[in-house]
Amino acid sequence: MAPKSITRATKLCLLLLVTMFIYSSAEVGQLKETNMTLYLQDRSAGPNATVVPVTGIPGRLWTFSSFGTMFCSDDPITVGFDKTSAQIGRVQGIFVTSALDGSSTHVSVSIVFTNATYNGSTIQIQGASRQFESVREVAVVGGTGIFRYARGYATFETIYLDTLISYAVIRCNVTVLYY
């Protein structure tokens, strides 16, 4: 038979474990969902370019469909389609053409908000983007500020493209869950 002190210690440990489980299971905040539509004003050439190639395979042309090409992006985000609509933030990050046939890029970008509602908050987006599909879906993997502990998904859809001036408008629909 075990001494009473071991039995009491075992009971105390069990009580402590149950208390920790209840505390960790307690609701720390109400899970919120936000859906938003953003417009990325994307310029890939000229003096005001917001997307530029930064490296690629030596001796090959660095294009969006060239395997191994890495781009850096700092696109303005507006509330509407028109480039003169109110700017609410920027999409900043990198993407790499990661499929040998050029059909996919790996995206790692942050939506950085500058508007009054979400100022200073960010949403982190990462994943494979099938760039020749009309709608591309990637994961929301985190966030800061209001969007701390964010998770969800984002879709990108090129809704306007002018190849002569290397300008595109990309609609981004974001569904994000956060506390």
Image (cartoon, helix red, strand yellow):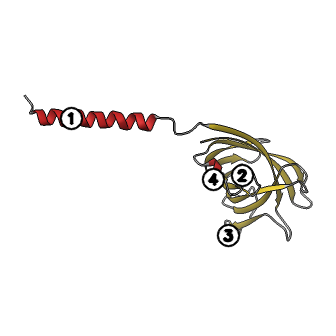
Q: Cβ–Cβ below 8 Å for labels 1 and 3? A: no
**Label 2: element kind:** loop
Which amino acid type is marked by label 2? Tyr
Q: Residue drawn at (39%, 35%), measured in percent from left and top?
A: 21
Which amino acid type is marked by label 3? Pro
Q: Residue drawn at (16%, 32%), measured in percent from left and top?
A: 7
Q: Position of residue 29 (x, y in %)?
A: 56, 39
Which amino acid type is marked by label 4? Gly
Lower sequence index among marks 2 and 1: 1
**Label 3: element kind:** loop
Q: Residue furthest left?
A: 1
Q: Which dot, 1 or 3, sits closer to the camera? A: 1
Label of residue 118 in the image? 2
Q: Position of residue 88 (x, y in %)?
A: 79, 55
Q: Cβ–Cβ below 8 Å for labels 2 and 4? A: yes
89 sits left or right of 16 in the view: right
Rendered image quadrant of residue 62: bottom right
Lower sequence index among marks 4 and 3: 3
The residue identified by callout 3 is 58
From mark 2 to mark 3, how far is it between C-alphas?
41 Å
Q: Nearer the viewer, residue 88 or 168?
A: 88
> Which corner quadrant holds the C terminus?
top right
Figure check: 136 above or below 100:
above
Q: Nearer the viewer, residue 60 or 22?
A: 22
Q: Tell me the crowding category of disc 4: few under 14, some 14 to 19, or many 20 or more residues within 10 angstroms, Cα based.
A: few
Label of residue 82 in the image? none
